[in-house]
């Protein structure tokens, strides 16, 4: 007979339940949920400008409009 391999116990993750990043994200979500529609649109446009560059005078083909 072949020798049996010893079974290992379950792997325990040593990750903390909360981290600095998760706390920052929670605060950000709370602030975002309190924003008005106009504030959310303003910040969305600024984020799109930062990602894709300054907006041109023409509307892009994709539109990049915030879903309702």
Image: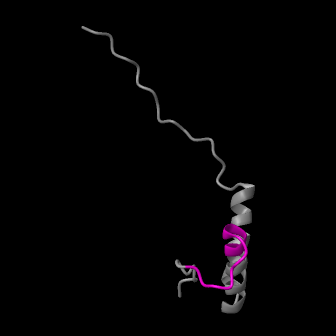
Part of the protein shown in magenta: 47-60
Could you say which quadrant of the image residue 6 lies in?
A: top left
Could you say which quadrant of the image residue 4 lies in?
A: top left
Q: Nearer the viewer, residue 2 or 43?
A: 43
Up the image or down, 34 lies above or below 23; here it is below
Q: Is residue 18 magenta?
A: no
At x 68% / y 80%, what residue is drawn?
56
At x 72% / y 63%, what residue is drawn?
23
Image quadrant holding the N terminus, namely top left
Outermost residue toward the top? 1
Up the image or down, 22 lies above or below 62; here it is above
Q: Is residue 54 magenta?
A: yes
**Residue 51 appears left or right of 5:** right
Image position, residue 43 (x, y; %): 72, 80
Image position, residue 5 (x, y; %): 37, 17
Outermost residue toward the left? 1
Up the image or down, 16 lies above or below 29; here it is above
At x 69% / y 77%, what residue is drawn?
30
Q: Nearer the viewer, residue 29 or 18?
A: 29
Image position, residue 14 (x, y; %): 62, 41
At x 71% / y 70%, what residue is drawn?
53
């Amino acid at each position: 007979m072949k020798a049996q391999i010893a079974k290992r116990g379950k792997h325990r993750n040593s990750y903390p339940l909360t981290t600095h990043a998760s706390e920052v994200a929670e605060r950000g979500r709370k602030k975002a949920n309190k924003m008005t529609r106009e504030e959310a649109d303003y910040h969305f446009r600024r984020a799109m400008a930062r990602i894709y560059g300054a907006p041109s005078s023409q509307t892009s083909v994709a539109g990049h409009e915030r879903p309702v």
